Image: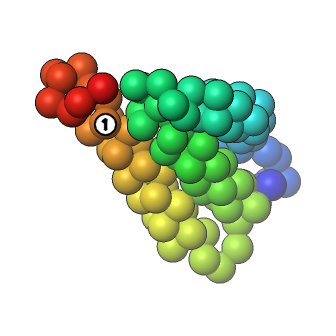
């Protein structure tokens, strides 16, 4: 964990650890949902969900562990997560506006 100079864990570290633990619980559920609904009309919306969650887990874990490349790793994995969420959003919009054949 990232520890400040006084040797205490910050509130931000606690929230980051809580985020990683909650996303770690959600990851297997998202894989099951994406696999289970792969042939459903909204399956295209669920396919990027595991990638999004895993990317955000990695970005938060990198910020928790610290190190030399904390900023770069956080930026890369956060960008991947946002990109995958954008793909899911576009698929959802196309499905809801009926611009794609179901």
Q: Position of residue 91 (x, y in %)?
A: 31, 36
Q: Quadrant of residue 38?
A: top right
Q: Residue at x 49, y 44 (%)?
A: 48
Q: Is residue 71 left or right of 29 when viewed as pictured?
A: left
Secondary structure found at label 1: helix
Above or below: residue 74 compared with residue 36: below
Q: Position of residue 86 (x, y in %)?
A: 33, 44
Give whichever of 14, 55 is nearer the camera.
55
User: Which residue bears the numbered disc 1?
Assistant: 91
Is residue 89 visible in the rendered structure shown here? Answer: yes
Q: Residue at x 30, y 26 (%)?
A: 102
Above or below: residue 13 compared with residue 67: above
Above or below: residue 18 compared with residue 85: above
Quarter of the image containing the N terminus?
bottom right
In the rendered image, the residue lying farthest to the right is 7
Q: Is residue 24 left or right of 95 when viewed as pictured?
A: right
Q: Is residue 39 left or right of 5 when viewed as pictured?
A: left
Q: Residue at x 27, y 38 (%)?
A: 90
Q: Position of residue 39 (x, y in %)?
A: 51, 31
Give whichever of 61, 27 is nearer the camera.
27
């Amino acid at each position: 964990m990232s520890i400040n100079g006084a040797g205490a864990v910050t509130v931000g570290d606690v929230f980051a650890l809580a985020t990683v633990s909650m996303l770690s619980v959600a990851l297997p559920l998202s894989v099951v949902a994406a696999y289970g609904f792969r042939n459903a009309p909204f399956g295209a919306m669920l396919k990027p969900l595991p990638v999004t969650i895993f990317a955000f887990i990695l970005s938060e874990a990198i910020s928790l562990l610290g190190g030399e490349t904390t900023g770069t790793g956080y930026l890369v994995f956060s960008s991947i997560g946002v990109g995958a969420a954008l793909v899911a959003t576009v698929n959802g919009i196309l499905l809801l506006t009926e611009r794609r054949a179901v």
